[in-house]
Image (cartoon, rainbow, N blue to C red):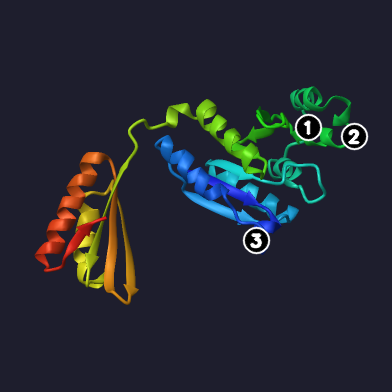
Amino acid sequence: MNIGIVIIGDEILSGKRRDGHFAHVVEALAKRGLELKWCRIIGDDPAFIVETLRQTYASGDIVFSFGGIGATPDDHTRRCAAVAADMDFVRHPEAVAEIEAQFGAQAYPQRILMADLPAGSTLIPNPFNRIPGFSINRHHFVPGFPQMAWPMLEWVLDHHYLELHDLAPETELVITAFDVMESPLLDVMNELVRRWPQVRFSSLPHIGEDGRRLELSVRGRTGQTAEAMDFLKSEIASLGYRWEDR
């Protein structure tokens, strides 16, 4: 099952703020033996948010959406999530209870707006200020603030997708091959992929003042990865090129 993220905010696209969610998601997933398949960064345009969510709903993927669930005029994600799912936009009683418990009378008239969610949503607890995120259609919507979003992300992974966790994460092995670029090694690369189809292979060429080199990596289950890397090292050496473990 694929896992993707949607990061919402004009401030990211304009460069006013730098995104930190991508790196954290990759790390949080890796700790659980999972991996990120895709990422979209979009602005605060309601029509574009709706179109994006319609596409991602239809994918069946697990999706984490960051940002835009507040109560300011540029926060459109809650309503857009309902529109994209063709669901009513309603006041969620459990969200009301959480917000009232945290803020009392000061929940009204503004903070309570954040209890308006797509009908049928389930809540994601927010340990920072109790204003919850929400889940619908395998999509999990959390705030843009890392101190709120990241524990909420991990709560979802550990409460909704525990069965997907792989307690024996994949192994990645990396070498650097010197004074060579990709073309002379294409036959070796293709043979590796043919023999070990479950192993991920990547090649990153570098050209610098110190010459040409390739960073070659294989990633997968420990036994298969070791076999594929042994093959790669042997073939590179047989072609007369030097390599080193990274």
Instruction: Provide the secondary structure element on which disc 2 rests.
Output: loop
Query: What residue is pinned by disc 2?
Result: 109
Q: Are marks 3 and 1 in contact (CB under 8 Å)?
A: no
Q: Which mark is residue 13?
A: 3
Question: Residue 153: image x %, image y %?
Answer: 57, 36
Looking at the rendered structure, the kind of residue marked 3 is Leu
Q: Which mark is residue 115?
A: 1
Left or right relative to 223: residue 62: right
Q: Identify the amino acid type marked 2.
A: Pro
Q: In the rendered structure, which disc, 3 or 2, sits on the residue that comes first in sequence?
A: 3
Residue 220's place in the image compared with 176, above or below, is above
- Badge 3 marks a residue whose secondary structure is helix
Dot placed on the residue nearer the N-terminal end, 3 or 1: 3
Say which of marks 3 and 1 sits in front.
Answer: 3
Identified at 68% across, 46% down, the residue is 67
Which quadrant is the C terminus positioned in? bottom left
Q: What's the distance in space between the residues labelled 3 and 1, CA to CA?
A: 28 Å
Q: Position of residue 46 (x, y in %)?
A: 74, 53
- In the depicted view, which residue is nearer to us: 102 or 157? 102
